[in-house]
Image: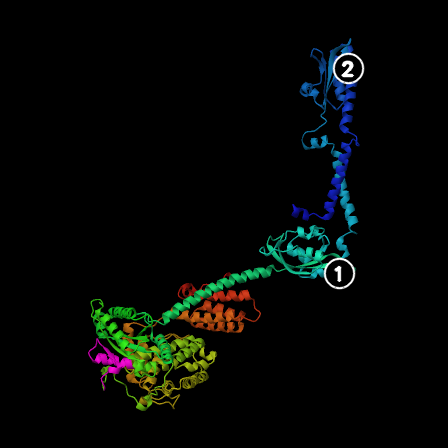
Amino acid sequence: MKKILGQISVVTRLSAGLALLTMTILLTAGTLGLMPNRFSAITEGRAELSKAVAVQLSVVIQQDSARELEKAVELIKQRNPSLLSLAVRHADGTLLAETSNHGKCWKKELLQEKNTPLMQVPLSRNNELWGNIELCFHPLKRSGFFGFLGSLNLQLPLFVALIGFLAYILFLRRSLRNLDPSAVIPDRVKVILDTLSEGVLILDNNERIIFANKPFIESTGLPETGLQGTKASEIDWQHADTTKKYPEYPWVEAVATGATLKSVPLTLKSAISKEMRTFVINSTPIRSTDGQTRGALATFDDVSWIEEKNTKLQKTLSLLEESRSKIQHQNEELKNLDMHDPLTGCLNRRAFFERFESEWEGSQRYKYPLGCVMVDVDHFKKINDTHGHAVGDQVLQQLSSILRDTARKSDYVCRYGGEEFCVLLSHTDINKTYEAAERFRKKIEESPFSNISVTVSLGVSANELGADSPQEMLDQADQALYAAKHGGRNQTARWDQMPEGLEVEKPQSQAEPQTNKASEETDNVHIPYHAVSALMSALEYRNADTAAHSRKVADLCVITARELMSVRDNFVLEVAALLHDIGKLGVPDAILLKPAPLTEEEWKVMETHDLMGVEIINSGFGSAELTNIVRNSHAWYGGNPRHPELPSGPDIPVRSRIILIADAFDAMTSDRVYRKAVSRQEAFAELRRCAPSQFDPELVERFIEAISAHDEHRSTAPLSESQAKALKIGIEIEKLSCALATKDIESLADMAHRLALTADTFGLPRIAEVANELFLFAKPGCDTVKLLEYTNSLFDLCHLSNLTTPGENKKHDPAKT
């Protein structure tokens, strides 16, 4: 009702009130008898008419003529329209004359009622009742609503009220034009107030609205005509924060206290859109020249869009946090998989090296013992040849399970390569290490392996025996392992109890290739594996494909050099293979990431990475041995025409020759944007074709033999291709998330650009598309909500399930996230 009244103008409401007041006065006058009673006059007139009719009919009755009486009755009815019927009835009840409809109209029982339309006039003869004249008039009251009005004598008051209402409207509009409260506000001020972005109300001391500008009317949806004269507090305001107690409305406080109130939040449902709008109200008193408060001015800043944006922002942040948590969990799982051998569940070599180095540093600092056990399955090749590689896999799985179950929780069990395992025991001296090795051996010997007798040979060492590095300690345990094999297998040998002058025989097919002993000298400088991991992380960040290639080359080198050289030399070879392309950290993106063959000039720039890599390794590790291997890893066996300064033939370090072969093989068997990978057999044929001009023929054959045997067994890649992609993408997403958390928009854009390049390389076009959109959008001052939506879209797209299913390329709209 309040809303409906608010839509009626003040003039209309005043006119209606005056009309009702006038009607009330007229009704009161009628009640007091100050106005003529129409019903009484009519009744009196009918009584006189009845007497006159009685006189006329008395004369006719004297003539004693029934016919004349009938004529007279009919004539009287015709001459008096107010009569419905007329009749003359004898005292004995006999009708002497009547009009045609008298029987229907005459109801004798109504004669006793007040205001009845029936009248009866008696006729006498000789002072005795002779008969009666019966008259039936039209009813004074009509039935229904209009009859009700007539009964109350409302016709005149209603007529006056209606005409007066119209007259009052015309009069008040003309009169109030000069009394409009807003007229005191100059037109130029109204125009200025209408141009403001905030709503404005000017109120009097009774908080009645004198003026409302257009922005207030538009934002609230309230009708302009209904606002003037309305109390501002009568509008359906609600406090934005219902948990707090607020004083009076700010404009009321401003008038009452004379103080200015700022930033009071109120909400109001729009009369048009029905949406809740949030306003921040500032109110200040209006004072006259004598300092008296005459009213208040209130401004209404519509901040609904801020509230909506904050709500959307909170929702997006919640979704982003959920997606980030999923990505982090996914990355942790993938990193855990990347650290473990997929067949046995043991740590892989690189994860083991990191753990070993941490334990080594701790033992050196806090002076606690550290033991190491190398384990090798006896006659494993015979098991594979006799029972098949599937059974061989089961043997390795069961053996690794026994090692993990028998070892302590603080010990580290690693699949070192093929059928060889390594166990690192913290806080364990050589005697305790030997006892642990014996427990491993006996447990394995006593365990059933699908009706196959399986035994192992073990070699142990400890840091108390003089090793200068983890690799030297591993080398000691490995030599002890060979001593155990030489001593008859199924036994444990200690490094400190090996027979002097013992030489381990190697199979003829694994004899060393031709070497120049001078080029193979070692410096025994400790190579910290944490530094290697840090450089590989930097290379991963710079270009994931190059880092993946380096890891594959390192794996191929380890497989090829197995039993060809000592554990320590194999470790240095593995590090050199990992770092052989580290110089690409300094190659420009335009060349490093070019999706096409390089030009001659670009090759010259690319070749400079070899020198950069050598300088990084030399300055970072100080190992002449490691530097020499990497420096010569591009030397051709028959001489490199591009680099005539490099050695050739046997003068090239063996480990450099192995890296060159593994590097070429992985390049040929890997897809490139500008060409497809060749098969392994085709790559083997190409290696043979390019020997001896480019590759050492003996090492090529050894490489092919080792890789073929390894392929027959099973790939030890810890992650599938899709998992590796997901991990690389996930790592970049985590970096992007960190930039977002620190509000570093510049770094965020850089991360998005790198992610786009990586996704494009992996053949993930939708991720590349959204990442590129984020890269273009991420500028200082950009819309935070939109930025979060793009980021959240990337998080959703980068889940492992999206990277491993065909649905990855489906459209994903950031606005729907």
Expressed as whole percent of the image width and height from the top left, the position of residue 323 reads: 46, 64
Expressed as whole percent of the image width and height from the top left, the position of residue 256 reads: 71, 56
Q: Quadrant of the N terminus?
A: top right
Give the amino acid type for the residue marked by disc 2 in the picture: Leu
Residue at the image point whose x is 70% and y is 22% from the top: 113
The range drawn in magenta is 476-500
Q: What element carries label 1?
A: helix
664 and 286: which is toward the camera = 286
Above/below status of 612 relative to 436:
below
Sort mark 1 into few (<14), some (14-19) or many (20+) by Cα contacts within 10 Å: few
| Quarter-of-image position of residue 681 | bottom left
- In the visual, does 128 lie left or right of 420? right
Q: Which mark is residue 5?
A: none
Mark 1 or mark 2: which is in front?
Answer: 1
| Residue 254: in magenta span | no
Say which residue label 2 marks.
Answer: 57
| Residue 479: in magenta span | yes
Give the amino acid type for the residue marked by disc 1 in the picture: Arg
Upstream in sequence: badge 1 or badge 2: 2
Say which residue label 1 marks.
Answer: 188
Expressed as whole percent of the image width and height from the top left, the position of residue 287 reads: 75, 59
Looking at the image, the residue that sits furthest to the top is 126
| Quarter-of-image position of residue 86 | top right
Residue at the image point whose x is 69% and y is 12% from the top: 94
760 and 51: which is toward the camera = 51
Expressed as whole percent of the image width and height from the top left, the position of residue 37 reads: 77, 29
Sort mark 2 into few (<14), some (14-19) or many (20+) by Cα contacts within 10 Å: some
